[in-house]
């Protein structure tokens, strides 16, 4: 296992353990439902935001939770949803010296809580395409998104980086 995989596994285990007291307090059998999805890329490719790229399709959808619209019913009913994010959310213009670079505006971070995503993994080859720190400015996940009871009030944690 790589260091990133071990870090992801440890953080996932800690998240599950943090939820157990709530479930066990009810005196019921402990059962936790986890959902995993990826790869998510919310942005343009090498600066091309044309009509078939995510920014244009997202605008046309008119849905804040796009692209999770069709899977959100499952995400709402699980205890933890984790996605892998293959992009950078930044307003930066300076890029890494590589062939493929993915970038979206920082406001796209709100897509995660709107789609009932509780954790975001950033340990991948695109998290520094625009030479930014590996972090996403996440909005709180308690603003009427319909998120499940296990959603942290401070927004989805970031795994890896």
Image (tube, rainbow, N blue to C red):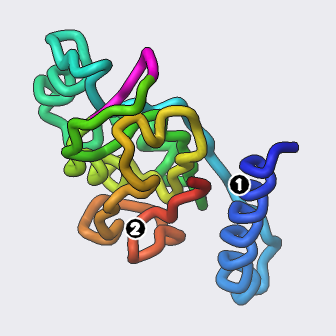
Most distant residue in the bottom direction: 25
How many neighbours does mark 1 have within 10 angstroms: few (below 14), some (14-19), or many (20 or more)?
A: some
**Label 2 belongs to which residue?**
155
Which part of the image, by quadrant, shows the C terminus? bottom right
State the image coordinates of residue 105 (x, y, percent, origin top left).
Answer: 21, 42
**Left or right of 157 on screen, residue 58:** left
From the viewer's side, name the closer residue of 74 and 101.
101
Which residue sits furthest right? 1
Distance from the alpha carbon under mark 2 to that under mark 1: 18 Å
Magenta-tinted stretch: 98-103
Q: Nearer the viewer, mark 2 or mark 1?
A: 1
Tell me where residue 137 sits by quadrant.
Answer: bottom left
Compared to residue 10, the image places residue 95 above or below, namely above
Counting from the top left corner in percent of width and height, residue 92 is at 23, 43
Mark positioned earlier in the residue sequence (2 or 1): 1
Helix, strand or loop at mark 2: loop
Q: Judge left or right: residue 121 versus residue 153.
A: right
> Is disc 1 placed on a helix, strand or loop?
helix
Residue toward you, 142 or 52: 52
> At 39% across and 75% down in the image, what residue appears?
154
- The answer to which image quadrant residue 36 occupies is top right
As drawn, the label of residue 8 is 1
């Amino acid at each position: 296992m790589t260091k990133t995989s071990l870090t992801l596994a440890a953080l996932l285990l800690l998240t599950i353990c943090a939820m157990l007291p709530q479930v066990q307090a009810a005196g019921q059998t402990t059962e936790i439902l986890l959902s995993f999805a990826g790869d998510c890329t919310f942005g343009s490719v090498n600066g091309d935001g044309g009509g078939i790229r995510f920014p244009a399709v997202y605008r046309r959808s008119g849905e804040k939770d796009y692209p999770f619209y069709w899977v959100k019913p499952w995400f709402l009913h699980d205890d933890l949803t984790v996605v892998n994010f293959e992009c950078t959310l930044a307003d930066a213009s300076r890029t890494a010296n590589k062939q493929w670079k993915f970038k979206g505006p920082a406001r796209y971070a709100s897509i995660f809580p709107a789609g009932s995503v509780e954790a975001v993994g950033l340990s991948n080859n695109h998290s520094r395409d625009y030479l930014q720190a590996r972090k996403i400015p996440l909005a709180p996940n308690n603003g009427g998104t319909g998120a499940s009871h296990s959603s942290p009030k401070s927004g989805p944690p970031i795994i890896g980086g």
